[in-house]
Image (cartoon, rainbow, N blue to C red):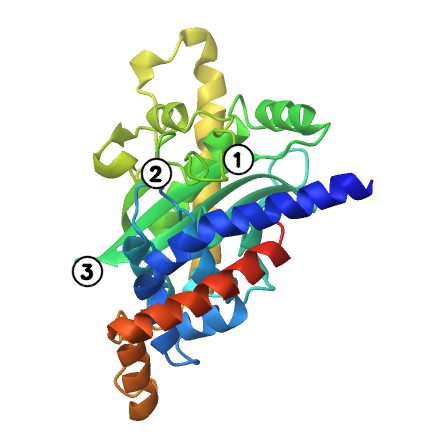
Amino acid sequence: MYALFALKERSRLMLAVQRTPALIRNFTAILPLLLFRKNSPVGALIRRRPELLLYLATKPFISNKWTAKTRVSRLVDHCNTVATTGGVLEFSESESVEILSLNTFEGSYTLTLDQSPWLETEGLLTLGLRESTDRFFQLTFCIASQSGKLVAYIGGIQGTTSADALANHKRFTKRTYGMRPRDFLVEAFKMLCGHIGVQRIMAVSDSAHANHFKTSGWDPATPKLSYDEIWTERGGTPVEDGFYALPVSPTRRRTEQIPKRKASLYRKRYALLGRAADDLLVRVRQHEQPRRPLANRSRPSPRAFPRGLRERLVAIAYAPVGSLLLAGWVYLLGLVFFAAIDL
């Protein structure tokens, strides 16, 4: 037993040694996150979850093709966009917001929004499909503002691995007239995006998924679900940077594409989706509030920190001698951090 424990601790230490250079290399990319006001959306998030600083420097976020600078930019954009959009997307980390109750057929199914720290490499918000209180399928995403338009980035979609997971999926599929949980979840996400004003949905591909990468000390299994297959079936088309562009509008088969023997099944399925869209719109409007003007929070405010402290941070980060000293301290802190947590 002691030998196994020692081996595990040694592996964690080796992983820390291997990943700490990435922290040093990307330190200047995450430095701006330290300069936000503590009561700003970004500053508040970093205060609650300081581990994000190290994760953004050393791990992929949504896409393994994004650099550390892009990862930081996306996180800042998400926080500011949620703060500006408000409504159903803005809630505390401890909350789980029910946005839809599927009470028109057998079973107790709901759609909820929450923040799942254990899925943080795939996004900061999670849309979950639950039966009673158990979440058995989930979609993780972030929101961004680009050229005045809302964009949603899907970083992951997955089900549970419980012993009765397959039975749960079959039961849900039967009750929703042949619609699999993953397909229903994607369509529900489109409904949500349409109701809050999202104009473009970008879904990560298999090859760009955050957990489909290889670096020193890290070689996880690829996603079990075929993301490319899911997005293609829901009307997605491959675009640049390893993403699929999904239409915000619902995916529906044309009448001539539906076999006559299944016409009644599809009619009931689409009627169910139509009722779900109407109910979801009601829930979204219940959370609506006047939109606040978006302050320029993409960069720290000049008053975010006292002038002297701000100048010292910049000097330390960019002065050659200071950078070497800082790199040494970061390296030691990285070793301690990565050795202290189970990655």
Work out whether mark 1 precedes mark 3 in sequence or the reverse, and give the earlier one. Answer: 3
Say whether disc 2 or disc 1 marks the residue closer to the N-terminus. 1
Q: Residues within 10 Å of mark 1 (few under 14, many from 20)?
A: some
What's the CA distance linking mark 2 and mark 1?
13 Å
Q: Residues within 10 Å of mark 2 (few under 14, many from 20)?
A: many
Q: Which residue is mark 2?
A: 203
Q: Looking at the figure, which quarter contains the N terminus?
A: top right
Q: Which mark is residue 237?
A: none
Q: Amino acid at mark 2?
A: Ala
- Give the residue drawn at x 43%, y 36%: 186
Q: Of callouts 2 and 3, which one flags the residue occurring earlier in the amino acid sequence?
A: 3
Q: Nearer the viewer, residue 185 or 52?
A: 52
Name the image quarter holding residue 163.
top right
Q: Nearer the viewer, residue 242 or 16?
A: 16
Left/right of residue 215 with respect to residue 74 in the rendered view = right
Identified by mark 3, the residue type is Gly
Mark pair 2, 3: CA separation = 20 Å
Reply above or below: 45 against 37: above
Closer to us: 321 or 296: 321
Examine the rendering and report whether any part of residue 291 can be seen: no
| Residue 189 picture quarter | top left
Does residue 31 show up? yes
Q: Nearer the viewer, residue 113 or 205?
A: 205
Q: Position of residue 54 (x, y in %)?
A: 46, 59
Disc number placed over residue 148 in the picture, else none: 3
Determine the secondary structure under disc 1.
strand
Query: What residue is shown with label 1?
Result: 158
